[in-house]
Structure formats: C-alpha cells, structure tokens
Image: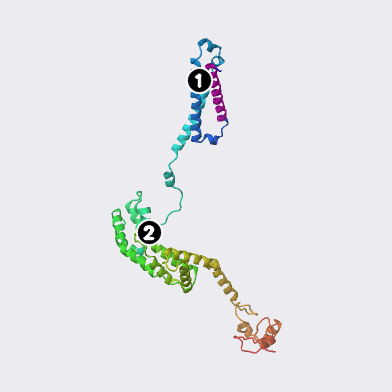
Amino acid sequence: MATETEQAISILENTALLLKKTQINLSKCPKQRLAKVGYLQTRIKTIEEYWMIFKEAHKKLLTCTTREERELLPYFENEEFFVQEDMYLCMLGDLTDMLAALESAKGKQPPPEELQNKKVNLPAIHLPLFSGEYELWPSFKDLFSSLIHNCTTLSDVEKLNYLKTSVAGEAATLLKHIPVTSANYIQAWGTLNHRYGNKRLIVNALLKRLFAQKKCTSQAATQLKYLLDTTNEVLQSLENLEVSTDSWDPVIIFLVAQKLDPESQKEWEQNSYSENSQDLSTWRDLRKFLEAKFRTLELVNPPTTTKLAKERVLHVTAAERPKQRSCALCTDAHTLCHCNVFTKMSPNERREHVKTNKLCFNCLGVGHSVFRAETDNFTISYCNSNFKE
C-alpha cells in the first residue's frame, strides 16, 4: 500500500504532466480558436483547477515529510514547485492578455443601432411635387416632415424655400403671397395643413377615386392590374387615416366585380361559387383571383414594347414610301414629259432621244416598251399624249 508521501508525489507528477500538455496544446492552437472569448475563458478555468490540485498536493507533501526527508527527494531538490508555478503563471498571463484584447476590441465596436444609423452614400431623395390633391397630402406631409420639417440642421428660411419649391397649382397659389423669411415658415406650413389636412376631405377624395374607376373594356392584364392596384391603394390610405375597412368586403367585392369585363366577371362568379356557394367571399379572395388572372394573361399574351411597335410602323412606312421620280434627260426632280429641255426639242429629236434611251413611246417611262404599257393597262396620270412610232 502506497504511503502518503508516494500518493502526494504521484498527484504532483500527474498534475505537472497535465500543465505541460496544456502548454503544448496552446502553442499548437489555431489563431481562429484563440480569438474566441468562450475558449479562452474555459482554458483559464481549467488551468486554475490544475494549479489548485498541484498546490494541495504540495501542501500535503510538506506535512507528511521531515526536513531531512525533503533533502533526499528529487521533487524538492529540482524545485519542481517553482518550475510548475512559473509555467502556470506564464500560461495564465498570456490567456488573460488575449481575453482582455478581445473584450477591448468588442467594446470599441459600435452597437447594432449605430451601425444601422451610420450614413452611407445613398441616392438623394427628391421631394415630390404637391399640386393640391387631397388624397396625396398625407404622403407628401410625411415625406416633407421627415426630410425637411423635422431636420434640425436647416433654418426656417431654408425650410420655407424648400416648401415653396415643392408645391404647384392651387397649393403654390396659397403660398404665393408669403415672403420667404424665417418668421413665415410656421405660417406657410400651417396654411397648407389647414387647407389639405382636413380628414373629411381626404376621405371623400379617396372614396371618389375608388368609385370613379373605369370599367375594364376587355380581358387585358394592364386594365386588371390598374383596377386592383388602385383599389388596394385607396384601402391602404383609408387604413392609414384610421378609417376601418374590415367590414367593407361585400361592398368592395360588388364594386370591383362591376368594373370587370364581362368575361372576367363571369369567371369570378364561377370561381367564388365553386369555392363555397353559401358563404360570402372576401376581398382577399377576389384579390387572389385578379392576381392569378392578370399573371395568366401576361404569360399567354406578353405585352409588346412600344419601341418594337414603333420600329415596325417606321419600317412599313419607309417600305411603302414611293420613290421620287427623276428626269431621264436632265436628272432633275420631274418626269421627262415635264422637262423644259425635252419640250423645246423638235419632234424628231424627241423621237430619237426616246429611241436611243429605250424609253416607252407611250408614257416616256423607263424599263418597259410601249407594247407592255398597252397590254398591262398602265395608267399614266401625267401623260395624255401618244408617242408611238
């Protein structure tokens, strides 16, 4: 049975071996792993546990041996305690420095909110031009407030200048008499808000736009998309104004269905009846039907570009354009029978010229004989004379 001294020395040797192995593993550890906070913290904790075991075994060895016995043991003779202590402190110091460097670098990084708010080179946002349409006022107001009105770096005179250059029509007339001074900005902004910020007028304009939509004349993807997009836009604008449209589905479905072309309306009624003949359809159902319908039409009949159609028209026009006539004698822009030089010639000279240039004696044209002019029923509007031999 091993004595206490042998047990203590065995624990010291095994723990020293673990510390040495840890030192070797750290020297071979990849840099990517040493850059992880969790790995460094675990390593520090393990090394400290090894060192606590080593110290406890060292104390036990001191208590169970005399001074004379220690002088004979290699452990004390080689000062193994101080060797292992130095190794422990070196590893602990290196790991602590690495951990502190990582935490310092992490602390210098801006939080996610600052990264999101960091300015980047984005395209400039152009202010929309407001002309006095009530239904467009909420969107104009929100965008202008975000870019100009709430901007603390702009003075009131600058804000007023931006405001006056962003309105047209009736809205511009309202601000026409207001001079561009710092004191007048609040008055100008309040004037527009008072005129166009009336909720009743905005809702009335939106409903008028909803009910005044044109009926689809044919089963065309563009007409169906316009009907669907306009309806969605109006409903969303009403929601933004806190006007609840949750129970409007039967009214919206009736209105939109009446605006469909006869064929699409028939298909919708068949579709809604086949889904559930008893329950009322929802606006979501009709919206899905219209989306599927215009996508199908776009696949079956892809729209032709305006440019291609224009090129075709120009091509046909150019191909059908008649060639300009030129005189066979003087090469001017007229026919031979209207040539002053030809008419001043004597009959014999004219006859000789026609014969030499192999022209038609009937119409003075090029490329055929008088026989062909007669048999093919050539109609010559500018020639009433007979130049036959």
Percent across and percent down for residue 112 are 43, 44
Task: Name the amino acid type tagged 1.
Answer: Ala
SS label for mark 2? helix
Quarter of image, res 372: bottom right
Task: Name the amino acid type tagged 2.
Answer: Ser
Q: Is residue 63 visible?
A: yes
* 168 left or right of 26 in image: left
C-alpha distance separating marks 2 and 1: 78 Å
Q: Write down the residue under mark 1.
A: 57
- Magenta residues, as a range? 3-26
Number of numbered labels in the structure image:
2
User: Which of the labelled discs sits on residue 233, or is there none?
Assistant: none
Q: Write down the residue under mark 2.
A: 139
* Chief secondary structure of the magenta portion: helix
Q: Is residue 106 above or below residue 348?
A: above
Q: Is residue 166 visible?
A: no
Sequence-wise, the earlier of marks 2 and 1 is 1
SS label for mark 1? helix
* Residue 19 is one of the magenta-drawn residues: yes
Q: Quadrant of the N terminus?
A: top right
Q: Is residue 361 above or below residue 4?
A: below
